[in-house]
Image (tube, rainbow, N blue to C red):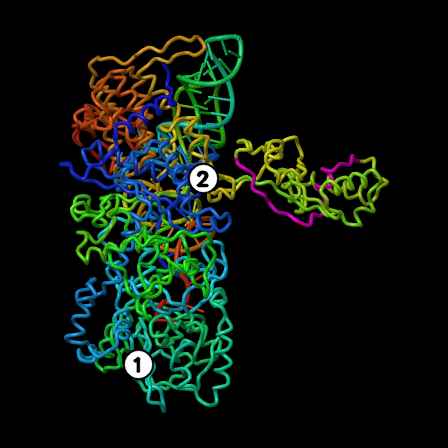
Amino acid sequence: MEYNFREIEKKWQQKWKDTNAYKVSNDSPKPSFYVLDMFPYPSGAGLHVGHPLGYIASDIYSRYKRLKGFNVLHPMGFDSFGLPAEQYALETGQHPAVTTEKNIETFKAQLDKIGFCYDWSREVRTSDPSYYKWTQKIFLELFNSYFCNTQKKARPITELVEKYSTKGNSQFSAAEWNGYSKKQQADILMNRRLAFSKFGEVNWCEALGTVLANDEVLNGVSERGGHPVEKKKMRQWYLRITAYADRLLQGLETVQFSDAMKEMQRNWIGKSEGCEMEFGIRDLDSAIKVYTTRPDTIFGVDFLVLAPEHSLVSQITTETEKAKIAEYLTYVKSRSDRERQSEVKQITGCFTGAYATNPFNGKPIPVWIAEYVLAGYGTGAIMAVPCGDQRDFAFAKHFNIPITNIIGEHYNGEEANSTKDATLQNSGFLDGMLMKDAITVAINKIEELAIGKRKVNFRMRDAGFSRQRYWGEPFPIIWEDEIAIPLNENELPLELPHAEKYGPGPNGEGPLANMEDWVNKAEGRRETSTMPGYAGSSWYFLRYMDPTNTETFCDRKASDYWNQVDVYVGGTEHAVGHLLYSRMWTKVLYDLGYIGFDEPFKKLVNQGMIQGVSAFVNVIGFYFGANLMMTLDEDQKKKIKILRDKYNDPESINICVSEDLMKFIRISYLDPQTEEQKHHMDYQNRIYNYLLNPVQKDLIQFDLDDILKIAPFNNYYRIHVPIEYVNHKDELDWERLKLENTKFLEKEFVTMSNTFICSREVEKMSKSKVNTINPDELCNKYGADTFRMYEMFLGPVEQSKPWDTKGIEGVHRFLKKLWRLFYADANPATNAPGKQVWNNETPTDADFKILHKTIKKIEQDTENFSYNTAVAAFMIAANELADAKCYKKEILSQILILLSPYAPHIAEELWSALSCDGSILDAAYPVLEEKYLLEATKEYPVSINGKMRSSINLPTDTTEEEAKQAVLANEVILKWLEGKEIKKFIFVKGRMINVVV
RNA sequence: GCCCCGGUGGUGAAAUUGGUAGACACGCAGGACUUAAAAUCCUGUUUACAGCAAUGUAAGUAACGGUUCAACUCCGUUCCGGGGCACCA
């Protein structure tokens, strides 16, 4: 009998399925524990080895917690709405629902092969009407709620209506409100709803035909595809996430996210504390309101800058400057967002002719407009302090505006210094104060004089919530006379109508606008945009708790039982998208009383990315110019002509060049330094000479390789080749490549030796880079258990690392070694049957020590997600047990329990071989007994001045004095101490001994 | 530019959080079993020097400096790599 992982894994996977071993109940006396993976988008490419990394980590944790006596919820589902399926539909005409279904089946089959303990009966799919019914319902909750600024939480909008109609507010009385038209009332309410619609500037991407959220735009181009993005005014839906900015920030204190993750979210929210204050404009009855975080620098203000879009610009511009300002505004309008973002270094601006007054010293301050001030942040106007702000400084220098220094020697005239530690000068009532202290003093004064007030600003904007796309949740909204009317709950789900075509509708609307029967209702017109990808994923963790409920999205009893997600595993790429949105939705649902917690994820573990190692062939376009041709003889010309005809290219040919040859080509253009390079140069010169002076022809033999070594090539690029065609020595199987890949059929492979060496690079793993490694193949070759353990052994879960298949042998060997603790190996050569070696002998203390050492280590490492060292601990244990010839059931069965979260199949198999009761899935986790770890004596390293010199064996209860005596009796140490005076003696119990001389 | 996180053998990485640096594995080299291969097992593997050898001595965690009896770990400066934000006043 030998370790036949294929049979074992098939057998147990079937058994677990048949017995519903992973089914989880909401009725259990056990404490609950919720382990969640970020659910995947089911792409057509299937899984690669990078995907399961996080899934394996969470699976191990779930199984571990189950053994520890918890009722563990560990579900899986699919984020199945999204752009790729729709893009695919556009290209092939296949309905997204069909391709999505197919992809999900592939994913599930692949996942099951790895042996995950998902309760598939709880599977959710965001594109399933029975799921998005509730996404729509929660949207309506958002629509029907507002953020109450006094209670700091979401309340039903009906309460606001009630208040308006009985008390009014600061803008209007109750009577006025009641007199407003329906449309007027609706508009006012729309300004308070958590999900609201407004005309706004949106990121419009012409190529994708849709509007993108801020975080889907990078440097002015779309995140997916890199298409240009411009501003466009459209009616859009938004989520009022800004209302929750403060609570999203505070909530971070209560969750266990990595510091980096918290920092990213904080940056995104971008809270800044400062004040708003007004600068009166000379000779005009108006004032400019600015926002600043540094009111302490008020006496250093040398000019004000307005955003070009600021409403006061036309009003304050003086006659003399009108033409220039108009010209500048035209210029600004001509600049796309992309230009403005990419050319931040460029300093532009224009003087308005107007002067404001510094309220503290009456100094006149020129007012400018400039691109670098954004209309959308703060008040759209700033007070510029050139000595303290680098941008203001650059602006002042550029336009020769005099600079006031208020920080003395901290300002050197060369660059601004944004310190808060300087002592203020030239600053009136703030003189002599430290800047950081002056901030509060200045704000107090500003409030006292009633020229401004404290103000907190956020960088975060409300989140765009509509997409002009087909494959997403339809909005349960009908527009009646420009008023958004929500559907009733009993009309949900509003199903996505079946489409034949997926192209955009008229006027920038989505594909749904083309379906007139569906859009036009007696009451009005349906909303035609659909919800973005993050709608369904913002709440899916709740649905797993109660996946089949038809009354509500998740029964309060279920969410109270499971509570927060205890451990959430996923990548960092969702730091500011999904994670912020789901946190906001959770807070809203909490405010409205649907759930009892306001942070969805207690602890977040970010798995790293597994990168792929791509292989390339270098392709050079080799140009046979007339000059070169002239120097060739008839044979050579004939050869070139054959090549030209072959590749159907009269002037040049493209040739795949081996990496070693590329190196040679590059090296030959350097100054020759080493012998090798000199050799190459010499070689090259000889070929040149040959080409230029055909007389010397006999000096060297001419062939294609030689030409390539020195030829001026006009074109160089690299093509990815499938990684499976390249062996571990980087040699390409190019015969096979040519056979199976038509792209290379027309290419000649040129190399110095007979092997073709590819170049390598670590990149993101993806289908297009043909560098993916399929987990199925590894599972077939080594088994799921080996695959699981190897992925964990690769390094810390949080770390990104390139995939390397080589090391997997080591883990596989460990499992085989483990098997041999139970069954002596069968030798296939002699065909000797394996025999049982495990026995019922009573373990010795030494045996127990191995066991309990392992229990301690595995428990610690599993709790800390330090799986790589846990795997190492298993290997050590197996080695030690083998060395000790310990094949005892009492020990081995306990080791199997420890192992079962990591390698469930082999653990279950051997568990049943030991004829232990029941399934190992429900075994009790071994209890650590420290007594076996206690040692009578311990080896103490002895150092002199911290330098290791020897070690001595001492009883663990040794006192310092006894240790000192022992050290002084040690010959090696005495030799080192010869002629030196002992100054101090340091004894760390159980650790070490150090002698200071 | 700003904010995080890193830098340890040929490779992936460990290090009880200040206490014997390199666990565990890969790779490589040598050996055993075998007609042979596969599989398995054993030995060695940071570097330099000395020695037939066991072993010894010195240096060594990006670089330099500091604190300490003792530093991969703490502090300072510099260099390199990765990630995030980017005119946010």
Disc nearer the start of the sequence (1/2) = 1
**Residue at 36%, 23% in the rendered image:** A815
Specify the quadrant that holds the N terminus of chain A: top left
Specify the quadrant that holds the C terminus of chain A: top left
Q: Residue farthest to the bottom?
A: A283
* CB atoms of marks 1 and 2 within 8 Å: no
**In the rendered structure, which amino acid carries the disc numbered 2?**
Pro
In the rendered image, which quarter is residue A782 located in?
top left
Q: Nearer the viewer, residue A894 or A407?
A: A894
| Callout 2 crowding tier (Cα within 10 Å): few <14, some 14–19, many ≥20 | some
Q: Which residue was labeled with disc 1?
A: A278
Which label belongs to residue A522? none
Confirm whether the magenta stretch covers residue A714: yes
Q: Residue farthest to the left?
A: A29
Q: Nearer the viewer, residue A970 or A138?
A: A138
**Residue at 23%, 63% in the rendered image:** A145
Whole-percent x, y for residue A63 in the image: 26, 33
- Residue at disc 2, secondary structure: strand
Q: Which residues are magenta?
A: A700-723
- Residue at disc 1, secondary structure: strand
Whole-percent x, y for residue A86 in the image: 44, 51
Confirm whether the magenta stretch covers residue A430: no
Chain bearing tag 1 is A
Disc 1/disc 2 C-alpha distance (Å): 56 Å
Whole-percent x, y for residue A647 in the image: 71, 42
Q: Which residue was labeled with disc 2?
A: A802
**In the rendered structure, which amino acid carries the disc numbered 1?**
Glu
Q: Nearer the viewer, residue B44 or B5?
A: B5
Q: Can residue A946 be seen in this snapshot?
A: no
| Callout 1 crowding tier (Cα within 10 Å): few <14, some 14–19, many ≥20 | many
